[in-house]
């Protein structure tokens, strides 16, 4: 009986190793996170001289694009949870790149809008963005970069 249990355990370990190898070899989430870290590093390096990082500049672009908007609207648009969004917005508010604006009417939400300082930051980073974009496309290849853009566009529309 003990022999059968040991054989079963070994078979489970072999099956478990196969399952882990399958996950390691084919996990879309793992590859997406790796891709995110590599690409974020490229853009972070490009934006470093401006005192901003890629997630902040992306968020600033979102606020510029959809603002004035509430935190909830920004979070939904950018697929970010409330705590991550708040953590990312705080230094941007402190730097004066975005501001809370008064809303006409009732409600607790104070919409956020890009400031002139934030708009100037965005404009000043465009050459660095172009360099980072070219590097990212070179690493990914044109077809993969286009596919990622298409997937992102479909998520924004969802």
Image (cartoon, rainbow, N blue to C red):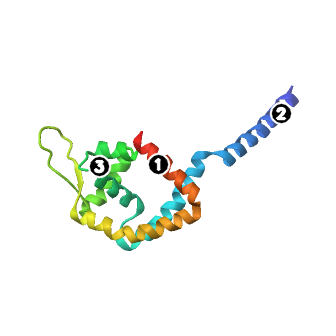
Which of the image's four quarters has the C terminus?
A: top left
Residue 15, label in figure? none
Which of the image's four quarters has the N terminus?
A: top right
Q: Is residue 112 visible?
A: yes
Residue at screen point 54% across, 51% down: 147
Image quarter for residue 122? Answer: bottom left
Where residue 53 sits: x, y (%)?
Answer: 40, 64
Q: Which residue is mark 2?
A: 6
Q: Which residue is mark 3?
A: 66
Where residue 55 sits: x, y (%)?
Answer: 40, 58
Considering the numbered disc 3 on the image, is that residue within a helix, a strand or a loop?
helix
Neighbor class of circle 1 (other Cα within 10 Å; few <14, some 14-19, many 20+) is few
Neighbor class of circle 3 (other Cα within 10 Å; few <14, some 14-19, many 20+) is some
Q: Which residue is mark 1?
A: 152
Side (left or right) of 126 relative to 23: left
Residue at screen point 34% across, 57% down: 61
Residue at screen point 36% across, 69% down: 125
Residue, far left: 105
Residue, far bottom: 49
Earlier-in-chain disc, 1 versus 2: 2
Q: Disc 1, disc 3: CB below 8 Å? A: no
Q: Is residue 82 visible?
A: no
Between the C-alphas of marks 1 and 2, the distance is 49 Å
């Amino acid at each position: 009986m003990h022999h059968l249990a040991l054989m079963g355990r070994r078979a489970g370990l072999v099956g478990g190793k196969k399952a882990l190898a399958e996950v390691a070899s084919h996990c879309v989430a793992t590859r997406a996170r790796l891709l995110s870290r590599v690409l974020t590093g490229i853009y972070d390096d490009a934006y470093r001289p401006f005192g901003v990082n890629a997630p902040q500049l992306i968020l600033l672009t979102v606020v510029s694009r959809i603002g004035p908007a509430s935190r909830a609207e920004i979070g939904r648009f950018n697929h970010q949870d409330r705590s991550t969004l708040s953590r990312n917005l705080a230094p941007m508010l402190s730097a004066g790149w975005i501001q809370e604006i008064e809303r006409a009417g009732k409600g607790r939400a104070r919409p956020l809008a890009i400031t002139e300082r934030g708009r100037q930051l965005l404009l000043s980073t465009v050459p660095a963005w172009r360099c980072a974009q070219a590097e990212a496309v070179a690493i990914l290849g044109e077809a993969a970069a286009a596919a990622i853009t298409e997937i992102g566009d479909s998520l924004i529309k969802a």
